[in-house]
């Protein structure tokens, strides 16, 4: 942790709010009735959005549990941490990770539920007091005990309540038991219709369909009919609603304990779900439904109520640590790639961010490994995968939010394609993204010395 300059008085505990970070697993940004989704009801999340601010364009750094969560806790890119899959066994959280940072500044840090950074449950050395291990059963009860009898009234708290739902949609697709109870059945006419971008669009990445085919046991949807996809969407909505009900319990607990006015509440997720868009379920691909997540912030009297920010590009995993550090009045390590969102949330300032990058890698034992990178701007989104036909995707998100028309195959958009190729190349070099650097589509004007530098070691 970076300490204040000598002679700087520490902030008074009474001047610093409590922080409750609520996380879902595998919840896409569009899965809220407040976001205009008519196929489900999320009164607790709607309440948070009404009483606080909804950041409408919030992206993860990597649409997979362990890489996203370790990124969020450290404020670092997954490739910087060396975490590009769920199969990580070594501890990657140093003394400047989120729990240690706030704990060292006087906060009482507690963690309930899914950790997965990297082991399933948090351990004492992670910077938090574990008050509930992995699993949604008993999670809200553990939080209630902490708020009523477990917290130190003389210290502000940083509490994380991390739900597994709606991640259990993975088990639903594989026709496996759902750990927290089955979803109700429904006749087809009561299930959500298919999204406009359902199915396979022309010039889609070959690599994605190959991964879907090779991991058919994981996805469980290879033989799905349109009717099956509609039932899948119905089950996913019910799982989100079940999680939302538990969020409502947490908000009621804050009210009963008299803590709501003094507590910043943040809600987000580690990644989304395909939800039948592009005939895709689960995660790892770089479609909007998978890399965009909810991001709600309620801070009574500090953050505007009912505000929806549809313009700010938020990198949830990178921005969380500097933002919480500012709220807690503690300085994180310098040179982190994320940005402090508090001026945007509290004062309505414009964030100086033109673009952000999302990365991915598919778990496989066979070469070549499918990797991908996405450059997201306010209007355009550029995606490149490491191999296969149509591995480059270019979408105008204003005109084509469903990413149905690949502009990379049209010569009239070549200048835009070249510009974004260059932006990704600059990012990969500046962040030492050596895993993907040799697999990028280089701009035509790339200097020869840069090409030689990239391919000095071909493999």
Image (cartoon, rainbow, N blue to C red):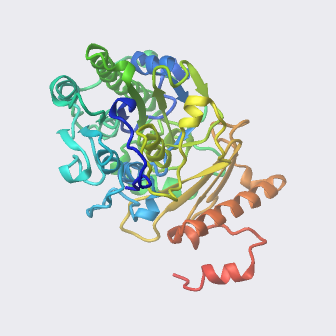
Q: How many marks?
A: 0
Query: How far from the left and from the top, in percent, is residue 442?
Result: 69, 69
Query: How far from the left and from the top, in percent, is residue 207?
Result: 53, 59
Q: Is residue 82 above or below residue 413?
A: below
Query: How far from the left and from the top, in percent, is residue 292?
Result: 52, 39
Comparing 322 with 365, the one in front is 322
Q: Is residue 20 above or below residue 384?
A: above
Comparing 186 with 241, the one in front is 241
> Is residue 271 shown left or right of residue 353?
left
Q: Is residue 339 above or below residue 369?
A: above
Image quadrant where one finds the N terminus: bottom left
What residue is drawn where x is 34% and y is 37%? 167
Corner quadrant of residue 399: top right
| Whether residue 113 is visible | no
Quick one: which residue is furthest to the front in this view?
A: 7
Query: How far from the left and from the top, in percent, is residue 221?
Result: 40, 42
Q: Is residue 48 above or below residue 375?
A: above
> Is residue 255 shown left or right of residue 383?
left
| Whether residue 368 is visible | yes
Comparing 111 with 227, the one in front is 111
> Is residue 118 shown left or right of residue 191?
left
């Amino acid at each position: 942790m970076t300490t204040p300059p000598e002679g700087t008085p520490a902030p008074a505990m009474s001047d610093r709010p409590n922080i409750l970070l609520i996380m879902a697993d595998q919840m896409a940004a569009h899965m809220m009735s407040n976001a205009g989704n008519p196929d489900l009801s999320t009164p607790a999340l709607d309440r948070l959005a009404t009483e606080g601010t909804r950041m409408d364009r919030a992206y993860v750094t990597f649409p997979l549990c362990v890489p996203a969560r370790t990124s969020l806790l450290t404020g670092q890119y997954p490739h910087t941490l060396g975490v590009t899959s769920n199969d990580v066994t070594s501890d990657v959280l140093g003394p400047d990770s989120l729990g240690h940072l706030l704990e060292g500044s006087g906060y009482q840090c507690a963690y309930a539920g899914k950790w997965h950074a990297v082991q399933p449950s948090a351990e004492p050395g992670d910077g938090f007091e574990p008050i509930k291990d992995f699993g949604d059963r008993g999670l809200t009860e553990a939080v209630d005990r902490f708020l009523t009898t477990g917290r130190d009234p003389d210290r502000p708290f940083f509490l994380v309540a991390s739900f597994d739902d709606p991640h259990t949609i993975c088990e639903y697709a594989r026709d496996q038991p759902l750990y927290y109870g089955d979803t109700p059945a429904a006749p087809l006419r009561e299930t959500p219709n298919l999204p406009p971008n359902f199915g396979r669009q022309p010039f889609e990445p070959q690599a994605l369909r190959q991964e879907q085919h090779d991991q058919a046991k994981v996805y469980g949807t290879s033989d799905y009919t349109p009717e099956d996809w509609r039932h899948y969407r119905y089950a996913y909505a019910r799982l989100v609603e079940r999680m939302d009900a538990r969020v409502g319990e947490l908000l009621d607990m804050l009210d009963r304990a008299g803590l709501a006015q003094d507590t910043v509440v943040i809600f987000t997720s580690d990644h989304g779900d395909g939800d039948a868009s592009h005939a895709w379920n689960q995660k790892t691909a770089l479609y909007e439904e998978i890399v965009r997540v909810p991001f709600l912030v309620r801070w009574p009297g500090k953050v505007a109520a009912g505000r929806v920010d549809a313009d700010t590009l938020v990198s949830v995993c990178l921005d969380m640590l500097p933002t919480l550090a500012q709220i807690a009045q503690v300085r994180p390590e310098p040179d982190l790639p994320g940005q402090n969102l508090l001026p945007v949330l509290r004062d309505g300032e414009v964030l100086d961010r033109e673009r952000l990058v999302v990365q991915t890698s598919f778990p496989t034992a066979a070469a070549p490994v499918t990797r991908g990178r996405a450059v997201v701007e306010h209007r355009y989104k550029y995606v490149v995968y490491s191999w296969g036909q149509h591995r480059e995707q270019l979408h105008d998100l204003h005109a084509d939010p469903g990413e149905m028309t690949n502009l990379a195959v049209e010569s009239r958009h070549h200048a835009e394609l070249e510009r974004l190729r260059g932006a990704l190349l600059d990012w990969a070099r500046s962040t030492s993204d050596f895993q993907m650097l040799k697999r990028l589509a280089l701009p035509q004007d790339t200097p020869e010395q840069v090409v030689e530098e990239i391919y000095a070691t071909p493999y």
